[in-house]
Amino acid sequence: MPLDAATALAAAPRTTRISWTRQDVLLYHLGIGAGVPATDPRELRYTLESRLHVLPSFATVAGGGKPAVTGALSRPGVDVDLARVLHGGQTLTLHRPLPAEGTATTTGRIVAVYDKGTAAVLVMRTDAADAAGPLWTGDAHVFVRGEGGWGGDRGPSTRPQPPAGEPDLVVERRLREDQALLYRLSGDLNPLHADPEFAGRAGFARPVLHGLCTYGVTLKAVVDTLLDGDVRRVRSYDTRFAGVVYPGETLRIRMWRRPTGDGVRVTVTAADRDDAAVLDGTVDAT
C-alpha cells in the first residue's frame, strides 16, 4: 500500500533551518490581497517595510521552502499521487508575535494518521523556534483520496457546530484573477494552483486557489475589523477547509464575536457560487 501509517508515524522528525526577510513578508501580504487601496494607512502596515506588522499566518510560508502539505508527502511510508491530495485544515498556535525578519529552526513530523474510509488524513506538525525560544506550532491536515479503508482510527471529528444567531460582521473580499499565481511565489508551487491540465487530472475545471491563501485572506479580515488591526492579539487560528475557491471569486466572510470576548468564530463562502462553503474556523485572541 502506498501509505504505510506505522512507518509514517515512526519516522524521525526532520529539522530544517529557515530564514525570512521583510521582502518575504511583503510578498506574502500581497499574495493574500493586502494593499487595496494602496495608500490606505491600514494597508500600509502590511505593505511598507518601515511600518511592517506581520500577519501571524505568515508562519505557514516562512522560509519559502517546502510547504507542510508536500513535506508530509516526502516522509517515509508516504508514496501517493499529488493529484489526489488536498489540504483539509490548518491549525496555528503563536507563542509570541512574529518578527519581520529572522532565522529559526523548524522540526516537522507526522503525529497522526487517520482512516476516513474513502481517504486517509495525515497530520503534519511543524514546531518553529529561534534563539529566543518557541515561535509557533502548526498542524496541517492532509487528505489523501483513495487511501483510507484499512481499518485504522478514524480520529476526532473536525466539523464544528454551526454558529448561533446572526453574525456580528459580514465583509466581502474580491480575489484577483492571478491571486494563485501571486501567492505561489511565497513557496507553494503545487501545479494544482497554476496548471489547467494538472487541475483537470485532479478533477477540477480549472486551477484552484491555495487553501492557505484563503486562510490568510480570512485572518487579515478578522484582524482588520474585530481585532482593531492588532496582529499581536492573535493567539491561535484553527480552520477546516470546506470547499474549493477559484481565483477571481468573491469571498463572503461572516464573523461572530465569542460571548467570552476571547476570540472570533468565522465562516467563509464563495459569494459567486450561491454561498458555497469554503472555510470554517476560529481565531483565539486576547
Image: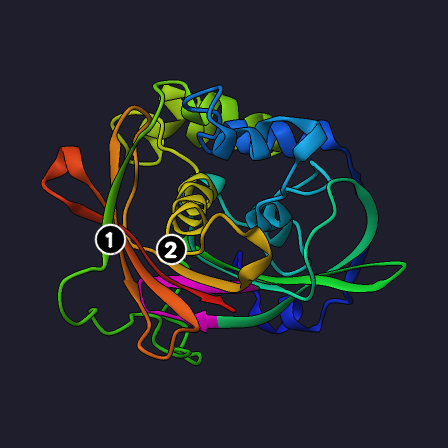
Label 2 belongs to which residue? 226
Residue at the outermost left position = 274
Residue at the outermost front position = 41
Q: Is residue 218 left or right of residue 166?
A: right
Q: Crowding near pointer 2: few (<14 within 10 Å), some, many (20+)?
A: some
Query: Residue 140: x and y, percent?
Result: 53, 58
Q: Amino acid at mark 2?
A: Leu
Query: Residue 53: x and y, percent?
Result: 63, 42
Q: Is residue 56 above or below residue 284?
A: above
Q: How is the image coloured?
A: rainbow
Which residue sits at x=52%, y=69%?
286
Q: Quadrant of residue 61?
A: top right
Residue 151 magenta-highlighted: no
Secondary structure state at the residue bearing disc 2: loop
Secondary structure state at the residue bearing disc 1: strand
Mostly what secondary structure, the magenta segment?
strand
Residue 118 magenta-highlighted: yes
What segment carries the magenta color?
114-123
